[in-house]
Image (spheres, rainbow, N blue to C red):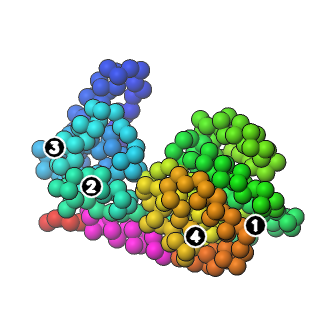
Amino acid sequence: KALGIQRRSTSVAHSILNNLRRVPRLRRTILEERPDRVLSFIDGTNVLTLLAASGTGIPVVVSERTNPARHRIPGPWRVLRRLTYPWAHAIVVQTEDAVRFFPPAWRRRIAVVPNPVPAVPAEPGPARPDNGRRRIVALGRLDPPKGFDLLIDAFASVAPLRPEWDLVIFGEGTERAALVSRIERAGLSERARLPGVVARLQEAFAESDLFVLSSRYEGFPNALCEALAFGLPAVAFDCPSGPSEILRNGVDGLLVPPEDVSGLAAAMLDLTGDAGRRRAFAGRAPEITRRFSIDRIAGLWETILRAGAS
């Protein structure tokens, strides 16, 4: 049911007014529908939903969809989150690391529910060119949190020692021009590419040999999950939050201390030079689809939503 409460805000005052209008409309809808539970996603919507449902007796489950310790929201929203989240029936986060952001007194109502990782369907793809080239792949928004500047710096150390390896970063964002300049300054224009958004993820992975996650922080890195599900070995910064709960160090990839460019380069150098180890990691990587299966994650959500139901 569309509520028609989205409005474009042109100023802070206009934003406040728009949000004040949303609460009574949302409250009327909740009272009309009388759901057993209200499930809300994303910080600002969570606050508005808790305000709208207050006093109705209808439990609200709120879910944070990124790392709240690193994803900064405006001051008024931070205050409102702190005031309203104690009203929630449950607070859902994606990682154990995210739990630590919240006050200890709240933690009995906090549940960790990762994203599900579906199995990758077996689809025949185009034959990979047998040209002797190997490829490191990364993907995500070309924005500072994804750390692609750090990845380019690490690859600049690896490239002279692994002349058969290239780097491809899929995605678009505000940092494109800066990243292109960084590639050019490093003399990597023939070895590192930014081809834009990938149309078919499986084809991008099928033409790659190693996945790298260089993020400064994450919520729950779906790109890492997808790469592992496809069977790619991976190297990842052990950033807050998610990689250490997804990637099993020494089993399906390598974890590197956060923002450690030399450590990232060393891990990439290790795996690009060891085909046997890459194959071993690749053989274990798809186990993520069992560890984070849709059935398991759906079961976690069902337990939360049923808790306390009469």
Please rate how many residues cluster around mark 2, counting C-alpha atoms within 10 Å: few if below 14, some from 14 to 19, many from 20.
many
Q: How far apart are marks 1 and 4 (CA)?
A: 25 Å
**Left or right of 167 in this view: 300:** left
Work out whether residue 15 or residue 150 is closer to the camera in this orientation and state it: 150
Which residue is tagged 3?
54
Q: For the residue labelled by badge 2, is the local secondary structure a helix, a strand or a loop? A: strand
Magenta segment range? 288-305
Q: For the residue labelled by badge 3, is the local secondary structure a helix, a strand or a loop? A: loop
- Label at residue 125: 1
- Residue at (62% x, 64% y) in the render: 267
- Earlier-in-chain disc, 2 versus 3: 3
Q: Distance between the residues labelled 4 and 3?
A: 46 Å
Q: Which is the main secondary structure of the residues drawn in magenta? A: helix
- Earlier-in-chain disc, 1 versus 4: 1
Q: Which of marks 2 and 4 is in front?
A: 4
- Label at residue 91: 2
